[in-house]
Image: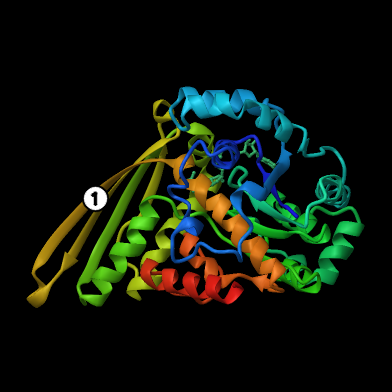
Amino acid sequence: MSTGVWLVGARGSVATTSMVGALALRAGLAEPIGCVTEHPDLRGSALPPIADLVFGGHDVVTTCLAKKAETLGEAGVVPARLVAAVADDLAAVEENIRTVPAGGTQAETAAALAADITAFRERLGLERVVVVNVSTTESLPEPRPAHGDLDLLESELAGGGSPLPASSLAAYAAFTAGASYVDFTPSTGARLPALDTLARRGGLPYGGHDGKTGETLVKSVLAPMFAHRNLAVRSWSGLNLLGGGDGANLAAPGPNAAKSASKQRVLAETLGYEPEGNTRIEYVDDLGDFKTAWDLVSFAGFLGVRMRMEFSWHGCDSALAAPLVLDLARLTSAAHRAGRQGPLTELAFFFKDPIGDVPHGLAEQWTLLREFVAGLA
Ligand SMILES: NC(=O)c1ccc[n+]([C@@H]2O[C@H](COP(=O)([O-])OP(=O)(O)OC[C@H]3O[C@@H](n4cnc5c(N)ncnc54)[C@H](O)[C@@H]3O)[C@@H](O)[C@H]2O)c1
């Protein structure tokens, strides 16, 4: 039986690239380059094959999926010939995408979102569904008592209140529908004690937060190097320039703050102290989905001698993110099948701001991931 992947933000760049990619892989038109779960150390029967993933999802806009894929093809984010080759399959996926209902109370919206996920599973005879949030990054919400207590949360919802940000409402709906949940964004998602209770009550696993695809990926390799060589990092400053829907949204102060905090966390966690400096994100329309990041690191060596290193990263954001979305769907589905519930801390390898008390260096995270996959087998 197949695994359903329900994408929140299904008409966005990352979602569309993930679906075009999976369909092209299924048709044997491309190699799984960038898919971590296809690495020889991880590949195996414990995970549902990419060819068996079935896609659906929610979005707030109604842009035609084929049109979005064509735009990505023209921009060079995905090869245009692959978009043309999977056009019929994309049209079939279009049938599985629903618009987020507007106007009702949060309880009504959550019930409608959950009903869409359940109908997707039943109509297509899916074994299980993983909900992956790849929607627009939100600002971090004000803390409220209902976030820490499921009974309080449910009574606020029943009373017509709106205690949850959209990403957490999506996680609430996923768990209510018996689906696992992954947050590829820095938004709050399932990261609330009340939702952790709900997930555990339903025997459901969840993972997050914020896919690690570029500058932070490099940081998670370099920071342990400085730490293990006992060099003193004095400052670490980064500037990220990007366009696209994500870039436009991240130009707003709230989402920008959420993303920047997520990007800088790896340094404090790995080095054990916070060097001077910040990560800045700037919107440059012309760059589209292609991002440039510049980082400057100043550090002190033996006898306090001062040195510097810089790097620049030119990445195609959605092409880097999409294979990880497929990996996370496969891994989370397999964990669900194996009876795991609550946070999947072993997925830290994929995230800028991983859940739980986990190492932030990429090499240690890789070991954790390999052991996790071996355990699933
Ligand atoms: N590309 C990367 O490398 C990368 C890495 C880490 C995290 N992310 C995150 O992934 C997310 C998606 O990025 P993208 O480039 O595809 O952005 P995008 O703007 O192209 O797509 C986001 C989609 O979410 C939809 N959306 C907004 N609010 C929604 C809601 N409440 N419910 C359902 N859908 C909603 C939008 O209409 C849009 O179609 C962003 O939050 C981004 O920060 C991306």
Graded by Cα atoms within 10 Å as few (under 14), some (14 to 19) or many (20 or more), the crowding at tag 1 reads few
- Give the structural element (helix, strand or loop) at label 1: strand
The chosen color scheme is rainbow
Q: Amino acid at mark 1?
A: Phe
Residue sitting nearer the eye, 344 or 38: 38
What residue occupies the far right of the structure in this picture? 159
Quarter-of-image position of residue 275: bottom left
- Residue 26's place in the image compared with 360, above or below, is above
Left or right: residue 199 compared with residue 259: right
Name the spot of residue 127 as percent of width and height, x first.
78, 57
Residue sitting nearer the eye, 256 or 30: 30
- Tell me what residue is drawn at x 67 percent, y 61 percent: 333
Name the spot of residue 173 as percent of width and height, x first.
79, 55
- Residue 361's place in the image compared with 178, above or below, is below
- Residue 45's place in the image compared with 213, above or below, is below
The residue wearing badge 1 is: 311
Determine if residue 185 is in view.
no
- Tell me what residue is drawn at x 23 percent, y 66 percent: 234
Left or right: residue 123 compared with residue 349: right
Determine if residue 165 is in view.
yes
Which corner quadrant holds the C terminus? bottom right
Left or right: residue 158 compared with residue 298: right
- Tell me what residue is drawn at x 87 percent, y 51 percent: 111
Name the spot of residue 2 as percent of width and height, x first.
73, 52
Number of on-image labels: 1
**Quarter of the picture for ligand 1?**
top right
